[in-house]
Amino acid sequence: MSITLRVIELGLSISENFPNRLGKSINCSDQDNLSSVLKNVSYQEKYEVINNNKDYNFKLLDGALIQLMYRFNSTGRILESHRLAYFPAPNFKTYEDDPEGYEQFFFGNSEYHDLIEKNIVNIPLRFDYSSDIGKFKEIHHPYSHLHLGEYEKCRIPSISPLTPSRFMNFILRNFYNTALVDYCGNYSFPNLYNFSKSTTSSEENLIHINFH
């Protein structure tokens, strides 16, 4: 909840849902996660369904959607899985049709060029984690991994599960750097703890995400 409040305070969100604890899960809505069942549909259709059903934690200034979903064991102490997703808006028709109005939306100036440049190709990304040994397959399906661009077989090993703070720092610093530095005082979300490492030595010999 503190991250949601801070994103609102920083003026980076135009719509949000506060996290809900439903049994062992912490989700962004009361319904089942829609993005996990929307397979074999176009990205635009997936985005529109998630957006229309408000199945997200935040909707950012440029229309991008953020999901932060965690599932713990019955004691609430051990993480079983997470799904941390970034869904960019599938097009920038608003900018193409009305560039002056779009730039005005971004605080009345064009300094948000890293959000609205026409040459930018935004891709969705997702950090997944599952402690289920039945799903694990060394290198091919690491316990914790990064998906890029909706390629299901693209699984880049991640050293461990991510906290919400680490994920939000990653998204804002890499995709909203101008907004973060110029308007938010280079603010970063404090990371108060780390999850235990989940990669194997073979996975660490590959290109992987390491933040410990």
Image (cartoon, helix red, strand yellow):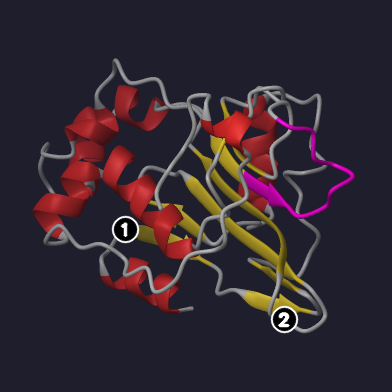
> What amino acid is at disc 2?
Gly
Mark 1 lies on residue: 12
The answer to whether 188 is drawn above or below residue 121 in the figure is: below
- Magenta range is 128-138
Residue nearer the viewer, 79 or 64: 79
* Residue 100, image quadrant: top left
Element class at badge 2:
loop
Residue nearer the viewer, 135 or 113: 135
Q: How many marks?
A: 2
- Give the mark nearest the N terminus, 1 or 2: 1
Q: Residue at x 54, y 62 (%)?
A: 57
Prevalent SS, magenta region: loop
Q: Residue furthest front?
A: 201
Residue 92 screen position, x and y as percent: 40, 28
Q: Residue at x 54, y 41 (%)?
A: 158
Residue 4 screen position, x and y as percent: 44, 71
